[in-house]
Image: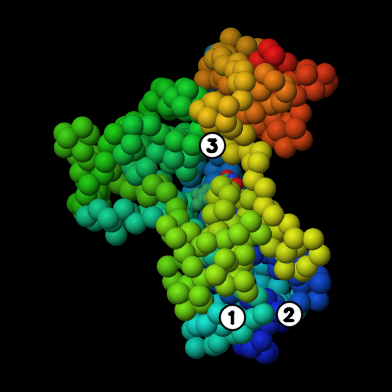
């Protein structure tokens, strides 16, 4: 086994078939395919190797969600066959989470070394159209893949440096008594639900008039209702204007409809959005054009201005910033690099889930989008607290909105809230991606009693 330190910043040669910036999902997917084709590859990362999903995103977060579930279900079934509440031991949970994240960087480095890929630690930036500098080392590549992920947007508020990020939240060894989340997107709600189940007082501060903006407004509203019932203080039309430190706490100045207020808290988390992490790359030096903070790419994820350069995943932001998209982008880039038939990206039917308790999930078109597309939109929408699937686990926050095209019968979109929504959405994703009709779904046998066995009662009549 090579000493990992020996692999650092010691190029065997400075010329590569492919130089990859990043070691996350998009990068590794492209790297493994191009390496299998015999390409000489260098990868660069300024942080420990592994990327967001496994180290600072989906995976560690879902470990924490698992603990929240272990508290939530007994709480809901208290007096319904369950006699005791459970509680989260945050220290133990943090240690359990680390069993997933701690081994990742070394195992990723080992995998790269075993595959004969040169690994560089440091910040990458362009020094020419096909030259990348990592600190003092210059690397030349026939092709360059930007898979640098995303970073929190700057908020431009006083005391911005006092904000922590979701990275820090997922690393907490102790849970503060009070937590304020700036922003009301999916990450804010997920962290809020975890922290609340672990006993924290949580405030979500959203500048616009609605939270969870890309999700269906009706279902998002039902989730906000549920969040408030849990004691999460969700405030919309509330802009955070400044943050000040007071000993071991923070004071936030907020403005709601021109009225100023203060929120006292022990931790302030930036959950107000992320953007492609392009600032450090000096893309101008590489002749890579950017507009509105995004690399100008063609449908093959290739830079329009510098054909040697491709981008994938959150850095490309060609599709939604989600792991399955990063993975698909990596495959598309590899296939386009390796030649043969050129593969365009196609982001139809990408499901997205808010891993709250209960989860909110969506795939396909929203109601407004579907109407704007001139479909003969048929909708079936209902809250389902009385359905067996909700009552069985005593969860009243449940419902759905399903959209289909009356002319063709094809499913256009599915929006779900409730226990099992995070898994059920995949059935709808398959249906939408496969162009299935409501009749196809009616005709399918689903195991009973499962979340999918509700599908026949959810479909709009055509
Ligand atoms: C808290 C959180 C929860 C999430 N939960 C989910 C979820 O449940 N499901 C889901 O699908 N998605 C989720 N996501 C999104 C998902 O994690 C990302 O879409 C995905 O990881 C993006 O992968 P990527 O390969 O594009 O970039 P990343 O995995 O972010 O990798 C980019 C890498 O590039 C490196 N880098 C950046 N700039 C430079 C530079 N100049 N030089 C050298 N290295 C550089 C970074 O250090 C990083 O390691 C979540 C994200 C967050 C933050």
On whether ligand 1 comes within 8 Å of the CB at mark 1, the answer is no
Say whether marks 1 and 2 touch (CB < 8 Å). Answer: no
Q: Quadrant of residue 394?
A: top right
**Residue 40 image point, x, y percent:** 73, 80
Say whether marks 3 and 2 touch (CB < 8 Å). Answer: no
**Could you tell me which residue is drawn at 49 percent across and 36 percent down?**
214
Q: Which residue is mark 1?
A: 130
Q: Residue furthest front?
A: 374
Residue 210 as seen in the image, left or right of residue 337: left
Q: Judge whether residue 410 can be spotted in this image.
A: yes
10 Å crowding of disc 3: few (<14), some (14-19), many (20+): many
Q: In the image shown, does 195 or 138 lie closer to the viewer?
A: 138
**Dot 2: element:** loop
- Disc nearer the start of the sequence (3/2): 2
Ligand 1 found in image quarter: bottom right
10 Å crowding of disc 2: few (<14), some (14-19), many (20+): some
Q: Judge whether residue 8 can be spotted in this image.
A: no
**Residue 206 image point, x, y percent:** 34, 38
**Residue 415 image point, x, y percent:** 58, 27
**Could you tell me which residue is drawn at 50 percent across and 83 percent down?**
127
**Could you tell me which residue is drawn at 29 percent across and 34 percent down?**
237
Tell me the quadrant of the picture where the N terminus can be found. Answer: bottom right
Question: What colour scheme governs how the chains and residues are painted in the rendered image of this protein?
Answer: rainbow
Tell me the quadrant of the picture where the C terminus can be found. Answer: top right
Q: In the image shown, does 435 or 239 lie closer to the viewer?
A: 435
Q: Which residue is mark 2?
A: 40
Q: Which residue is mark 3?
A: 354
**Residue 408 image point, x, y percent:** 72, 23
Q: Quadrant of residue 115?
A: bottom right
């Amino acid at each position: 086994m090579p000493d990992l330190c020996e692999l650092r910043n010691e190029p065997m040669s400075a010329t590569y078939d492919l130089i990859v910036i990043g070691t996350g999902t998009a990068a590794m997917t492209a790297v493994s395919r191009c390496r299998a084709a015999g390409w000489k590859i260098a990868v660069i990362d300024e942080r420990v190797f592994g990327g967001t999903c496994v180290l600072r995103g989906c995976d560690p977060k879902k470990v924490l969600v698992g603990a929240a579930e272990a508290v939530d279900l007994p709480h809901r079934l208290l007096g319904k066959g369950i006699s005791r509440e459970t509680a989260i031991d945050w220290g133990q949970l943090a240690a359990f989470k680390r069993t997933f994240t701690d081994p990742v960087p070394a195992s990723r480095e080992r995998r790269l070394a075993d595959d004969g890929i040169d690994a560089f630690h440091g910040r990458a930036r362009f020094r020419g159209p096909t030259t990348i500098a990592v600190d003092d080392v210059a690397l030349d590549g026939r092709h360059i893949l930007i898979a640098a992920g995303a970073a929190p947007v700057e908020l431009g508020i006083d005391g911005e440096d006092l904000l922590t990020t979701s990275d820090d939240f997922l690393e907490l060894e102790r849970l503060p008594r009070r937590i304020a989340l700036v922003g009301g997107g999916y990450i804010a709600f997920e962290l809020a639900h975890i922290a609340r189940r672990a006993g924290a007082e949580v405030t979500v501060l959203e500048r616009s008039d609605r939270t969870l903006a890309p999700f269906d407004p009706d279902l998002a509203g039902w989730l906000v209702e549920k969040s408030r019932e849990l004691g999460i203080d969700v405030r919309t039309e509330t802009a955070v204007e400044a943050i000040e430190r007071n000993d071991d706490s923070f004071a936030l100045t907020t403005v709601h409809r021109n009225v100023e207020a203060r929120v006292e808290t022990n931790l302030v988390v930036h959950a107000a959005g992320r953007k492609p992490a392009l600032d450090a790359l000096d893309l101008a030096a590489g002749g890579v054009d950017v507009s509105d903070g995004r690399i100008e790419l063609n449908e093959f994820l290739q830079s329009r201005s510098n054909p040697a350069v491709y981008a994938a995943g959150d850095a490309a932001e060609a599709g939604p910033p989600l792991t399955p998209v990063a993975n698909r982008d990596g495959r598309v880039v590899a296939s386009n690099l390796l030649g043969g038939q050129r593969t365009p990206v196609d982001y139809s039917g990408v499901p997205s889930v808010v891993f709250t308790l209960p989860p909110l999930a969506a795939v396909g078109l929203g109601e407004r989008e579907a109407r704007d597309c001139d479909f003969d939109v048929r909708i079936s929408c209902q809250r389902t607290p009385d359905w067996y699937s909700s009552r069985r686990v005593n969860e009243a926050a449940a419902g759905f909105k399903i959209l289909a095209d009356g002319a063709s019968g094809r499913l256009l979109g599915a929006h779900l809230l409730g226990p099992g929504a995070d898994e059920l959405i995949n059935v709808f994703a398959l249906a939408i991606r496969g162009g299935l009709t409501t009749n196809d779904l009616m005709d399918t046998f689903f195991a009973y009693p499962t979340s999918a066995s509700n599908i026949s009662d959810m479909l709009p009549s055509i």
